[in-house]
Structures are given as C-alpha cells and as structure tokens.
Image (spheres, grey):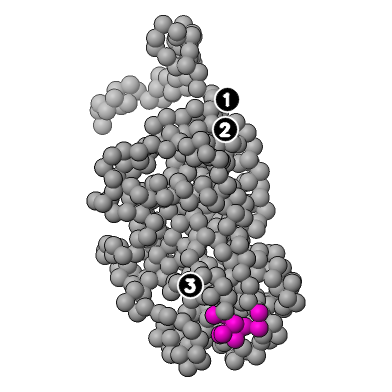
Amino acid sequence: MAKKVVLAYSGGLDTSVAVRWIREEWGAEVVALAVDVGQAPSADGGDWERIRQRALAAGAVEAEVVDARDELAAGYFGPALRANALYEGKYPLVSALSRPVIARHLVLAARRHGADAVAHGCTGKGNDQVRFEVGVRTLAPDLDVLAPVRVWGLTRDDCIDYAARHDIPITVTREKPYSIDENLVGRAIECGAMEDPWVAPPDDVYELTRDVADAPTERREIVVAFERGTPVALDGRAMGPAELVAAVGAAAGEYGFGRIDMVENRRVGIKSRETYECPGSLALIVAHQDLEAITVERDVMREKARLEGRYAELVYDGLWFSPLREALDAFVESTQRHVTGEVRLRLEPGRCAPVGRRAEAPLYDYALATYEAEDAFRHQDAEGFVRLWGLSTETWSRRQQPFGAQAGEGS
C-alpha cells in the first residue's frame, strides 16, 4: 500500500472525508492538492485559503492550491475550441477538459512531495475516474492511482456522519442534492430530481444563465476577435484567455444562452441525463465556426468537420494525453493559419447568432459572389461544368436505369 498519497482535493464532502479515510484505513500520509480551474472554491463556500485549512483540519500533512485557470483556457479549451469540439454535437467538454489539467498537476505534486500514489474522489459510475486514471498512468506509469470512494461503501449520509465524528469542518445542504462541477468553460449539474429524464431541470440549478423570461428584451451585439483561431479580444479590448471566456459568458448568459439538457452516453456504458450551462464556451464556438466559414478552404473545412466529433470523443473518453489527439491537434493547427478576423454576435433572449464577419485573408470574393454590375464570374463556363458534373449519372440513367422508372413510373 502507498505511503504518501496526493489527493485531488475539492474542499467538498467526499474529498474531505477521503483525506481522513485514507489515513485511517490505508495508513498513508495525504497531501491535498486543490487545482483552481475557475470554479468556486467549494460547494459550500469559502476562499482557497479556507479550503486549504479545511484539508489540514481533515488530516492532510500538507495542502496546496495551484492556479491553473490560464493553463486550462489556453492549453486545453483553446485547442478544443479550434477543433469546434462538441461531444455528441452539444456538449463543450466542461469537465473533460479540466481533468487532464488536474491529472498533470497531481503528477507534478507527487514528484515534488515524493509520493508513490495519487488519489481522486470519483465514483465507479462516472467518466472522471477514467480521465484521471488514464491521464495519470499515461504521464507517470510508476504511480499508483487510488479511488477510495469506489471501495469505502459510504452513502452521502454516511459521509456526513463520518465528517461529524471526526470534526471535519463541512457544511452540507441536504435540500439541494445536486452534483456540480464547474470551471471557466462552464458548469455541469446532475443528480437529484434530474435523474428522471422527463423532469425539467429545477430553476435553482442555474447560476451562469438567466431564465429567458427574465432576459433583456433589447438586443445586444458583441464583437469577438480571433488570431489564428484563438479568441484574443472582445469589443476591441484585448484580453487573456480566461478573462475573455468569462466576459463572453457574462454577456451571453445575461440573455439566457448556453443551457444544455441532454441524455449522453458515458464512457462506462450507461446513459446519463446531464444539465450544463456554458454560455461563454458555446458562444465562442459559434463565433469560431462562423469565422472558419469565410477563411477555410472547402475541402479542408469538410474534412475538419468530419474529425471534430472524433476529437471531442477522445477528450470526453479521457484520452487527452494520446498520440491521436496530438496528431489531430497538428491537423487542426494547420487549418487555423488564416482564421484571423472578427465575428459580430447578436444576443437576444435564448439566442446567440453571428450577424457579421470579416477576416484578414477571406476566401469570400465579392466580385465572384455578387449579382450586381461588379460581377466577375465567368458565366459562360457554367454550361460545360454542369454537363461534365452530371455526366456520370446521365450515363447511368441512359444505360442502366430506364427514365420511366427513375421518374416513378411503372412497377
């Protein structure tokens, strides 16, 4: 059994109990590592220093906090944004993108503290156990990965009682039994009444988005600037990646944009009802897709669209640190060389849509597209092009498919 363990620590009930439980049951010293990826410090409030002190009160020999917000925004959400990565066409990978960041810092902390194992607070049903464990084992195959929640057999009420017996300073609200994970990409909410897929998400689960009924009625437009596929400014003001995601999210969320209610396919093989709110990340993907439409060549764009779903699956399935993801990133980066420009997004209740776009090197040519006097398109070329384009099906129809059958005549 491990002698020293670095635990991914959130400050919530399960990981606080895990600190003491690992020490009592497995006899290992615990270093608590809290990674700030843009979430509130814990589900029950408090700043990061309070969370650090909570870990020490629970029995950790050391506790530290790492600020990884810009790292997540630039190094993980950035590539996923350039890939327009949406799992099952909807979900911008909120939790899936933060897990490899945390896994990396678990390994770094294990090296710093001379630990022989890392641990997480995930259950056996979820995706995050896969993401943490595959990530850590890819980066550091020599480290053990422990999952106390999978073996301790404690219910939520048992954990509350355990914390009380051991004077672990936790405040728990039984009235809101939701499981919430958040970072700068968005929020993921599950459990409680939402485990019935017929039941609408309760109003109190949302924090980043207004109800559409309460959204401003007056439209608003914002302009997002990109350089080589990376968002760099909002309304002419340059911003760092984390700040920009938050600012776009605040604007879009005010109009009730960014809510997702879906039944998704988990990696472990079960279907799960999930509720997300991701106003900033979704709005940026909308803008990025629109800028690509004016700057990326047709066949490249079609092939990229084919690979975007695969990219999202890799990230969702915990394979961020994989050769295929690296290879796909190389392809995506090559497509972004000219994705530099601005997109104007119009916000209205429940909606965020592009209404204008301009680029430094657009493939849109006004002289070719216009029907006005400036038209430079060679119309005389069209007849031969159309005839040759349809020659194959025309030949097939003449030789193998009687015209009457094609037109729906006869039996």
Q: CA distance from mark 3 to mark 1?
A: 48 Å
- Residue drawn where x is 74% and y is 72% of the image: 112
Q: Which residue is mark 2?
A: 340
Give amino acid for label 3.
Gly
Q: Quadrant of residue 272?
A: bottom left
Q: Which residue is mark 3?
A: 46
Report the residue that reaches farthest toward the bottom. 165
- Residue drawn where x is 43% and y is 74% of the image: 44
Q: Quadrant of residue 339?
A: top right
* Secondary structure beneath label 3: loop
What are the residue bounds of the magenta stretch? 54-62
Give amino acid for label 1.
Ala
Q: Earlier in the sequence, mark 3 or mark 1?
A: 3
Asked whether the beta carbons under mark 3 and mark 1 sit within 8 Å of each other, the answer is no
Residue 178: x and y, percent? 38, 71
288 in magenta: no
- Residue drawn where x is 35% and y is 57% of the image: 261
* Mark number, residue 361: 1
The answer to whether residue 367 is seen in the rendering is yes
Q: CA distance from mark 1 to mark 2?
A: 8 Å
